[in-house]
Every structure is written in C-alpha cells, then in structure tokens.
Amino acid sequence: MRDTLNVGLIGYKFMGKAHSNAYRKMGMFFDPSLKVSMKAICGREEPWVRESAEKFGWDSYETSWEKLIARDDIDVIDITAPSNAHKEIALKAAEAGKHIFCEKPLALNLKDAREMLAAVGKYKVKHQIGFNYCFAPAVQMAKKLIDEGKLGQIYHFRALYLQDWIIDPEFPLVWRLDKNVAGSGSLGDLGAHIIDLARFLLGEFDKVMGISKTFIKERPIVEKMEGLSAKSQQSAPKGKVTVDDATLFLTEFKNGALGSFEATRFAQGHKNALSFEINGSRGSLKFELERLNELQYYSAEDAPGTQGFRTIQCTEDVHPYAGAWWPAGHVIGYEHTFVHELYEFVQSIANDKPTMPDFNDGVKCSQVLEGVEQSANTGKWVSLDTL
Ligand SMILES: NC(=O)c1ccc[n+]([C@@H]2O[C@H](COP(=O)([O-])OP(=O)(O)OC[C@H]3O[C@@H](n4cnc5c(N)ncnc54)[C@H](O)[C@@H]3O)[C@@H](O)[C@H]2O)c1
C-alpha cells in the first residue's frame, strides 16, 4: 500500500467545508499512520467547485462524481452531497474498490441503507458514517464512565435536539424540506444524531412510539440555497413541505432502560441545542453540545452534604482526543469533532481494522428512523425486530 491516502471529496458546502477543514488540520495535531492527501473535490458547478478547491486546499477538482470515482489516484470517496445522492455514489465507489466515508443519514430509507451496507461488505472496503458528535471528548468520557459502571444500572436516556432556523413561514423550501432529497425532516437530520448517541452510550433500541408534525405545510420555492440559508423572491410561488418539522418519540432499549427523544426545527431561541441526560442507579450524566467541553456528572456515592452535579472540563490528556490539541483548559469546538472522526477513518484504513460508527451503525439508525416514522403514521408501537 502507498504511504499516502488520496481523498476525493464530493460536495463543497456545509459538510464539504467541515471535512476539508478536518483533513487540513489532521496531520498537524494527530499522527495518522498514512499521510492524507487532499487530491480532488467534486461539485456540479465548475466556477464554485474550482473556487472551493483553491480556498480549501484541494489539488484538483471534478464536476462529475462518476469521473472522480473512476480516477486511479483516488483511494477514498467522502460523500457530503445531500442524502438522496448517497446510495448511488456509495454503490459505485464500493464497486470501484474505494473506501467510503458517508454523511448521515446513510440513505433515504432502511432498504437503501441495507443495500449500501451489503455493497461495502461485498467489495471489502472500509466504511464510516458521519455521526461526529460521539467524537466530542466529553461524549467519549461519558461512554468511559458508563462502561466502568459509574452509573450502575441505567434507567433513563433523555435527549433533545432543538433548532429554530425554519420557524419563519416565509423561509424557503430548501432541499432539507423535500422528502425525495432528505428522506425525512427533523427526524432524519437531528433525530439521527441523538439516536446514534443513544446507541453509542446505551446500546440497541427494542421498540419505538413516535409523533410527528409539519407546522408549516407550504413554503416559497427557493431561488438560491447555501448550506442552511436560502433566499426566495418576494411573492414566489409556494411548494409543499413533505417532511416533518418536529418529531418526538419514546423507546425501550434492549437493556430495559427507557428513552425519550425530541427533534425539532421549531424551538425558538435554540440554534444547535443537542443535549442528553442519563440516569442510573449510582449516578447521572448530562451533556450539552453548545458547551461541548463539559460533562456534568453526579455520583450518588459522594458523601452526604457534598452531593451535586460536578462539571468535568474534558480538556486534559486523559480525555479521549483532547491531549492532541492544546494544554488543559484550552477548549476545543464543533469543527474538532470532524477531525477526530476522519482521523479514526484514516486509521482504520491504514491498520486494516474496523471503525465506528460504520455503515452497520448507519443501518441500525435508519431502522430506528423508519420505526419512528411508521409509528407516527399508525399511532402504534413498532418493534424494531420486525423491520
Ligand atoms: N454530521 C453533521 O452534523 C451534518 C451536518 C449537516 C449536514 N449533514 C449531512 O451532510 C449531507 C450534506 O449536507 P450539507 O449541509 O453539507 O448540504 P449543502 O447543501 O450545504 O451541500 C451539499 C453539497 O453537495 C453538492 N451536491 C449535491 N448533489 C450533488 C451531486 N449529484 N454531485 C456532486 N455534488 C453534489 C452540492 O453542490 C453541495 O456542494 C447531508 O446528508 C446531511 O444530512 C451532516
């Protein structure tokens, strides 16, 4: 094998930028076993993709993902196009023997996600999905405390993922509001992250019961889209919103714990407020993404009179990934989680080892998403083993 891993990235907007930034920083702070070369970036519009290649530091660019995959000098295909493009690209990339990193949710539905998992298995390529939040040092620390038994028997997992960016009824009909492109709305976009965190920290879901709502059913047709922002002309014609604006659901985990989840883009005042709380017989943990260096820990075994939630600053060498960055207390942020996930992906290729979260985790997440959607449509509990 070469001592360099050549990456081809598809997409140059929100996630394209986040991944580009991560590849650039990786070698400066971590020591991956293979050098990473930012070989080519791909998008459909030449002027924009050329500009992104120059700005983000890619050696070359392509305007067709088929051409990118066909290139012999590309080892990895990194997919940051919207969800409706994931499957076709991944199937072709796997067949061409490329390792694949794919943004979440893995596909538009469970069936497509399973096809993608089968393809990476068949062609024996490495695969990972972009659930970046489990790579925050504080989340990794939460996992460590749970695995050490510090929480004892776990009774509750409670998660919220709250945003407010489409609360204005005049906000245009961006691709995230189109089921054919996004698969689902708040559920697959925000809910997918908290489902993955729950699986990472507690294990598998057994059954789910959900409720979904689309508050604004029609929106102005979009003129220009840019990441999470978009413009439409005044008095533009309206089109139908085909996804959920908000989804809430309950679960029972296989280990007997109970879970509650809320994913909404209609929580006024909340920009990217992912949070979770876990309660067990010996203690509790709390995490908020907007304060991602911190983990709140309550131990029921502290001496009476001194009990209470303590704030652990997860910035010390003992905290996963933190030691690679700055001295203790010199906090990190959102972008660093992408460096961690892509570093793990590079290591899995270099050392021929499985990584996580992989396409199998992507399928398990899609199974929960599909169960919740089915339950929201029927008003009944859905056992995930039936899907
Ligand atoms: N991990 C996270 O936290 C996170 C955050 C945001 C988005 N996402 C996921 O990342 C994916 C992309 O979201 P985004 O916010 O970056 O979207 P975006 O609209 O900002 O960017 C999408 C990019 O894909 C390109 N593209 C679209 N179709 C293409 C095609 N056929 N060929 C080549 N390029 C194509 C667009 O030109 C654009 O550069 C989605 O699956 C989304 O769910 C993940």
Image (tube, rainbow, N blue to C red):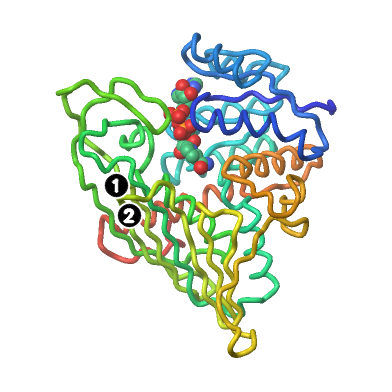
Q: Badge 1: few (under 14), some or many (20 or more) residues near its Cα, within 10 Å?
A: many
Q: Residue at x 65, y 13 (%)?
A: 60
- Residue 244 bears which disc, if any? 1
Q: Which residue is mark 2?
A: 247
Percent position of residue 359, x then y:
58, 45
Q: Is mark 1 within 8 Å of ligand 1?
A: no
Examine the rendering and report whether any part of residue 386 can be seen.
yes
Q: Secondary structure at mark 1?
A: loop
Task: Give the camera-side residue of 140 and 324.
Answer: 324
Say which amino acid is labelled 1: Asp
Percent position of residue 205, x then y:
49, 64
Q: What is the number of callouts on the image?
A: 2
* Lateral position of residue 248 relative to residue 100, left or right: left
Percent position of residue 255, x then y:
54, 73
Q: Secondary structure at mark 2?
A: strand
Say which amino acid is labelled 2: Thr
* Lateral position of residue 359 relative to residue 219, left or right: right
Q: Residue at x 56, y 11 (%)?
A: 50
Examine the rendering and report whether any part of residue 106 can be seen.
no
Task: Name the quadrant containing residue 96.
Answer: top right
The answer to whether mark 2 and mark 1 are in CB contact below 8 A is yes
